[in-house]
Image (cartoon, helix red, strand yellow):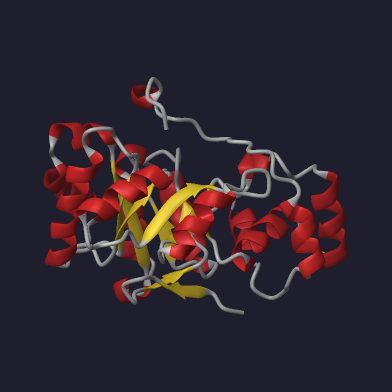
Amino acid sequence: MKETVFLNNDREMPLLGLGVYKLPDDVQAEAAVTSAISAGYRMIDTASVYKNEESVGRAIAKCGVPRKDLFITSKIWNNAQRLGDVQGAFSRSLDRLKVSYVDLYLIHWPVPGCYLSTWKELESILESGRALSIGVSNFDIRHLEELRKISGIIPAVNQIECHPLCYPAELIEYCKAFGIQVQAYAPLARGAYFDNDVMCVLGTKYARTPAQIGLRWAIQKGISVIPKSINPERIRSNGNIFDFNIEDEDMAIIDTLNEDLHTSHVPEDLRDIQF
């Protein structure tokens, strides 16, 4: 089974990674990353606002896997965009991670009046070689269109909430049309579909958990996934999705479950803004 995808700049990215959102910067976060790498994961997704980049850095320093074989993502938060402190925020992320480069650096949210200038700063970071790819997160079509007007560099990735209960088809088709890799955060919907009758029946059919069915569904749609867990067994289970295929008719059945259910929330400092 294909476990990686080539981005629009010919960089190779794993389709599966570990998300570390809300994992505290301590032994717990470090242990989760260590468990994931031991289970075969090679992509770790963090962000400055998660406040656990140091834990991620400790884990990757100790893991025994060469840095070139890992794919590390971080993101710039809203306050640094407003302050125009993009370069400083990026450098601090590198310092906390104890790495000389990241594989992917994202704009975490499209802060109005800031995200276009932030993107230009990311372009210079890309040119410097300190980020091998740059992209965005939580961008809708109109944000991506604005980027296209001012830049010749198309985001390599758009990281959005996506799972069987939340499938923004128009946005995903737009990204595919322009060569932007979609990456799903919260692909397990915080367990919201684990008791769903359809997912349970399909889990029985394929001898998999509903979580594995949901992750495999995304992978077969060409969407990268970054499920979060601190449980070593669940981390291993979430990674065990490359040795089976969901049949086309079952993929279509899962598609019908979409109800635009968002389990994540717009940050407080952006809640009065129309997205």
Give the tally of numbered discs.
Answer: 0
**Nearer-the-camera pick, 183 or 274:** 274
Residue in view at x 77 percent, y 69 percent: 248
Residue in view at x 43 percent, y 44 percent: 140
Above or below: residue 19 compared with residue 79: below
Whether residue 112 sits left or right of residue 200 in the image: it is left
Residue in view at x 55 percent, y 45 percent: 186
**Nearer-the-camera pick, 231 or 140:** 140
Outermost top residue: 272
Whether residue 250 sits left or right of residue 124 in the image: it is right
| Figure quadrant of the N terminus | bottom right
Tell me residue 263's x, y (percent): 58, 35
Residue in view at x 27 percent, y 34 percent: 78
Above or below: residue 42 compared with residue 169: below
Tell me residue 243's x, y (percent): 69, 76
Whether residue 248 sits left or right of residue 169 in the image: it is right
Tell me residue 177's x, y (percent): 46, 64
Outermost bottom residue: 1
Tell me residue 83's x, y (percent): 14, 32
**Nearer-the-camera pick, 176 or 269:** 176
Residue 208: in sight, yes or no?
Answer: no
Q: Quadrant of residue 139?
A: top left
| Figure quadrant of the C terminus | top left
Outermost front residue: 149
Residue 265: in sight, yes or no?
Answer: yes
